[in-house]
Amino acid sequence: MNSKQNEDEEQRRQWGARAWAILAAVRTRSPLIQCITNFVSMDLMANTLLSAGASPAMLHSVEELPDFTPNADALCINVGTLSPAWLPAMKVAAELAVKAGKPWVLDPVAAGASKFRMIACLELTNLKPTVIRGNGSEIIALSKASTEYSMGVDSCHESVDAVEAAKSLAQSSGAVVAVSGAVDIVTDGKQVIGARNGVAMMQKITATGCSVTALIAAFLAVDQLHALEATASALSIFGIAGEMGMDVAKGPASLRTHLIDSLYGLDEAALNSRIRISSL
Ligand SMILES: Nc1ncnc2c1ncn2[C@@H]1O[C@H](COP(=O)(O)OP(=O)(O)O)[C@@H](O)[C@H]1O
Ligand SMILES: Cc1ncsc1CCOP(=O)(O)O
Ligand SMILES: [Mg+2]
């Protein structure tokens, strides 16, 4: 091995140890994750959290938030099926989480689909999310506060095309910003990290993006002080579960099942041999 290969191997070893420690903490501590999310994603998101060892609660009634949100370990807010009736609960929950010192994650699904949705996403961005995770088109749209860049929930941009938008959004919001895609990008506005796990077939299962956002919330719940590292680790581990699931899947429907099984059964050796995280 030359010195560059040695350095890469050392980086991989360090990321493996870090990601395993966070996953092990989730499995041991079983953090309670409140999810205010779209109707499409509720099932896969809850099952993703359970298979990782966390405890999901899909709870969005504004009447319950003062009792519940401060006691949850992290909050995930997803605007996928946004309506005026739900937005106040999202804002109140975000404020309660921040006040209680709990991390919260925003998934700006289809941020550029309408003015109503964009304004809602901008308002939520102003409420100090710990992490914002979207696909390339969503992060570009939100960063530019524009409805010109994305329409539906699927991306028409590569994640690497959103690096500058992600950095700019991270700097303006103070959040760590993650852009999912073939390479998952994570930035705090200065450092940029790339996680290269996953398979393209994950895009053919609805709510995989939503679910990895919730997994980020679970990782933050046990490692709030290292948001950049926790986010990259969650994205990489979800990708590894996708890769291992794809080894046996026949298509999107069976990949959905095998991804959940692989996340549940993931061991340290498999994680260490598959993890692909590095600086960009
Ligand atoms: N081309 C790809 N290769 C590998 N993994 C991918 C690819 N596209 C998306 N993924 C993975 O699929 C999951 C969902 O990402 P994405 O489809 O970008 O989100 P969204 O569903 O919000 O649009 C992420 O874990 C991401 O890493
Ligand atoms: C299809 C759809 N429509 C509104 S929300 C949603 C799910 C989006 O999930 P993801 O962003 O993970 O693909
Ligand atoms: Mg999405």
Image (tube, grey):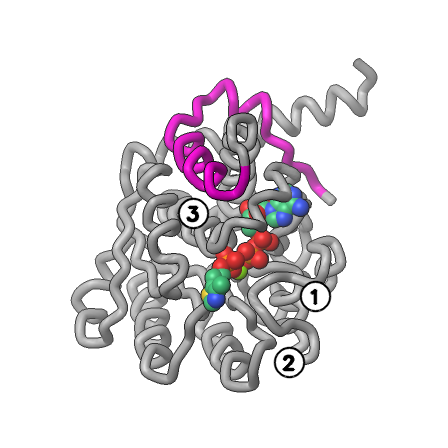
Give the residue at the far top of this rendering: 1
Q: Quadrant where the C terminus lies?
A: top right
Residue beneath disc 3: 215
Q: Amino acid at mark 3?
A: Leu
* 3 and 2 marks in contact (CB < 8 Å): no
Range of residues picked out in magenta: 251-279
Dot 1, crowdedness within 10 Å: few (<14), some or many (≥20)?
many
Please determine whether, in this image, residue 35 is positioned above or below residue 230: below
Using the image as rendered, state which of residue 47 and residue 36 is in the foreground.
47
Q: Amino acid at mark 2?
A: Thr
* 1 and 2 marks in contact (CB < 8 Å): no
Membership of 259 in magenta stretch: yes
Q: Which of disc 1 and disc 3 is earlier in sequence?
A: 1
Residue 57: x %, y % from top left: 26, 55
Question: How far apart are the two marked residues, 1 and 2, measured between alpha carbons?
Answer: 14 Å
Residue 156: x %, y % from top left: 70, 63
Residue beneath disc 2: 147
Which residue shows up at 52% across the image and 21% down it?
270
Membership of 233 in magenta stretch: no
Residue beneath disc 1: 165
Q: Is residue 117 left or right of residue 89?
A: right
How many numbered marks are there? 3
Residue 236: x %, y % from top left: 56, 39
Q: Is residue 21 left or right of residue 68?
A: right
Which residue shows up at 54% across the image and 44% down it?
235
Q: Which of disc 2 and disc 3 is earlier in sequence?
A: 2
